[in-house]
Amino acid sequence: MPPVEPTIARVILDTPLPQLDRLLDYRIPAGMEGVVPGVRVSVPLRTANRMTQGFVVELATQQEHPGPLSDLEAVVSSAEVLRPEVWRLVRAVADRAAGSAIDVLRLAIPKRQVRVEKAWLAARAAGRAEPPPLEREAPVVPGYATGEVDALLAGGRAALEVDPGVERAGEVWVGRWALALAALAARTVTRGASAILVAPDHRDIRQLEAALGELLPADRIVRFDAGQPDADRYRGMLRAMGEEPVVVLGGRSAVYAPASRLGLLAVWNDGDPLLAEPLTPYVHARDAALIRQEQQGGALVFAGHTRTTEVERLAELGWLSRLAPERPRRARVVSTANAAGAPDDAHARIPGIAWREAAAAVATGPVLVQVARPGYSPGLRCAECGTAARCRRCGGPLRQQRAGGAPSCLWCGVEETHWRCTECGSSRLTRVGAGSTRTAEELGRAFPGARVVVADGERRVLEVDERPALVVATRGAEPVAAGGYRAVLLLDGERMVARETLRIAEDCLRWWSDAAALAADGAPVMLVGVGGRLATALSTGNVGAFARAELADRRALGFPPAARVATLEGLPDAVAAARRALPPEAAVLAERVADGRARAIIRFDYAHGAEVARAVRGEIVRQAATRRKPIPGAARPGRAPLPLRARFDDPEPFDEL
DNA sequence: AGCACGCCGACT
DNA sequence: GTCGGCGTGCTC
C-alpha cells in the first residue's frame, strides 16, 4: 500500500484573539511545495480576502474540523522556524498561565528578518550552516567533584551552590559562578548535546560569554537574547536550530531557544526580577525551564549565590538535589556594630571597624561601597513639619539628583523649583538619606586623593582595574574588579530591609551576597546596620538554612511559593463570572473594584494549578468571544483592554493591596 | 479584530 | 411587503 500523502496542515495563527489559540485545519492545495511542520504560512481567515500568518505545527491525512476547509494561501519561507520541542514547550507554558501559545511563541521566534533568513537558507543549502566538528576535551568543572557533575549531566536536576570570588577568563575578570556554569555547558557540548544558559541581565551574560570563550570556539556559542538587535537575535535562533550542539546564552527568553538535543538547561540567579517575564502570560523563566526539562529531559540547574524559596521548595520536595563545591569557599564577613544615629555624613554612617578596614583596603586596591539608591538625596522632607515632599503634578516622591540641583519627581521627572509644603506652607526642604552621588562625594572628602568611581543605572561601569579606588555602586550595578575588591562595604542595609515586600529578606540577602561575591578571596565584607538572621545568613554562607526558614514562614502564612496565586483583572462582572467558574479549591484572598475594573487575588495549591488555569482560560475565551461593548459612556482609549485578564504567579501580588 | 447572520421598527 | 438597526457568534 503506498503511503498516504498528508493533505491537511494544522496551523497556529498569529493573532491576539484567545478564541483562535488552537490548531486550525487547512487543505494543502495540489502542487504547493514545502508544507512541512515549522514553516511560516499565510492562510485565509473567514473571508477569502483576509490573510493571516501562522505556523504549520503538524500535518495530517484527515481533517478534524467537521466543516469545509480553506486552502493554505502560501508558504512564506522554507525555514522550519517552529521546532516541535519549542511548540510543545510554548503550548504547556501558555496552558499553565491561562494564556495564548502565540504570546509565548513571540518570545521563542523573533520577528522575521528576511535577509538573515535568506543568508541562512543559502548557507544551509551549501552545507556551510554547521560549525566544523569539535575536537576538545571535556573540561572539568572547577571546584566540584567530577562524579557528581557527571551524575547531574546525565539528566539530573540540581540547586547548585557556587563559590564567591572572581577569576580571570582571558582578558576579563568574571565570577567563579560563571566559570562553573560555562564549564558545565562546555562539558555538555563536548559530549554532543546543546546547553542553554539563562541569566538575568547583560552583565551576567557578558561574564558567561567570556568564560565560555575560554572553553569553546566562537562558533559553538550562540547569543539569543531580547537585548540584541532584531537581526542578530533572529540569526541566533537560526544558528541554535542546527544539528551540531551549541551553547545558547541569553536572558529570560533564551529558555525558549530551539535545541532538539538539550543536555543542560541552567538558570543563573533565579531570584532576580529580570527573569520574570513582563509580557503576557507573564511566565517566569524558572517555571518555563522546569516545564522544558520535564518535557525534553537533560540536566536542569538553578544556580545562585543564594537560594530562592521557589528553588528551596523544589529541593525539599526532592525534585531538585543539592549540589555544592567539594570544599566550599566563604566570604569573610566582618561583623560591625550598628551604625551610629544621624546618617548625615559618611563617617557617621560607617562604624569604626568597617571604616578602618575600608581605609586599609583602599590603599591597596579597589573597595566596593554598595548603596541603595542613585542620585544625591533620595528623599526630601519639609524642614518645618517633616512631611515627605511630593510632586504637585503626579504625587510622586521628590528627590535631589545632584548636589545643589533642583528637586525633581521620581515618577514623572518634572523639576519642582517652587516647592511649598502642603501641610504647613513652608518652602524649606531638608534632605533625607544619601544616594550614590552624595555618598561618593562624602567618601571623596573623607579619603582625599582616592579615586572615586560611581556606578549606577545612569553611569554604567562594567569593570574596574586593580588600582586603588572607592567604587560606589547601587545594588545590582556593581562592576567586577580585577582581582576582586579588597573590601566590600554594604552600606544601606537598613534602608533596603525596611521595604515591605513579600520577598524583601530574600532580595536583600541576594543583593548583599552577589556584591560580597565580588570580593577578593579573604577580603573583608562588612554589612552595616543589620543584624539578626539576615546578617547571620550572610556571614555563615548557609544558603539552604536561610531559604528553609524563609519558606517555613511563607508556609505558615499561606503565601507564595508555599501556594500559588493568580490575579484576575477586568470588568467587574467578567471577574465575578471567572470567580464562579473556579474550582472550589481556589480561594479568593482579596477583591477590589476601582474605576470600572475589578481585581481579585486567588490562591490555590500546586496540585490544582492546571485545573484553575483551565477554568480561567475558558472564561477568558468566553468573555473575549461574547463581550465586546465597552462600558456605555466611558471614554474609549484607542485600545480597549480585554474584558478579563489573568496573571498567574504574580511576583508581588500583595504589594498593591 | 472584522464580518456575516439574524430578528424587530419606519419606509417606497 | 422590504431596508437596515446593530446584538450575537464565528473564524479551519
Image (cartoon, coloured by chain):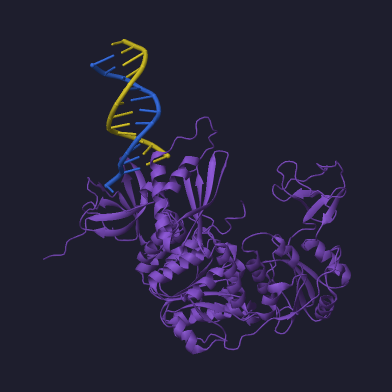
Chain colours: A purple, B yellow, C blue
* Badge count: 0
- Between A249 and A232, the one lying in front of the other is A249
Task: Give the residue displayed 40% in from the left and 61% down from the top.
Answer: A92
Q: Quadrant of residue A519?
A: bottom right
* Vertical arrangement, residue A96 with respect to residue A388, above or below: below
Would residue A183 be visible to someone looking at this image?
yes
Q: Position of residue A435 (x, y in %)?
A: 78, 61
Q: Is residue A539 above or below residue A41?
A: below
Instruction: Indicate whether A3 appears above or below C6.
Output: below
Question: In the rendered view, does A653 fall on the left or right side of A196?
Answer: right
Q: Examine the image and state in which quarter residue A547 appears.
A: bottom right
Q: Position of residue A301 (x, y in %)?
A: 50, 75
Name the residue: 52% across, 64% down.
A252
Picture quarter with the N terminus of chain A: bottom left
- Residue A567 in percent (x, y) is at 52, 52
- Residue A239 visible somewhere in the drawing: no
Q: Position of residue A177 (x, y in %)?
A: 59, 78
Q: Is residue A28 left or right of residue A308?
A: left
Please tell me which residue is depicted at 56% across the width and 81% down the height of the picture.
Answer: A180
In the image: residue A326, left or right of residue A38: right
In the image, A475 versus A452, the foreground residue is A475
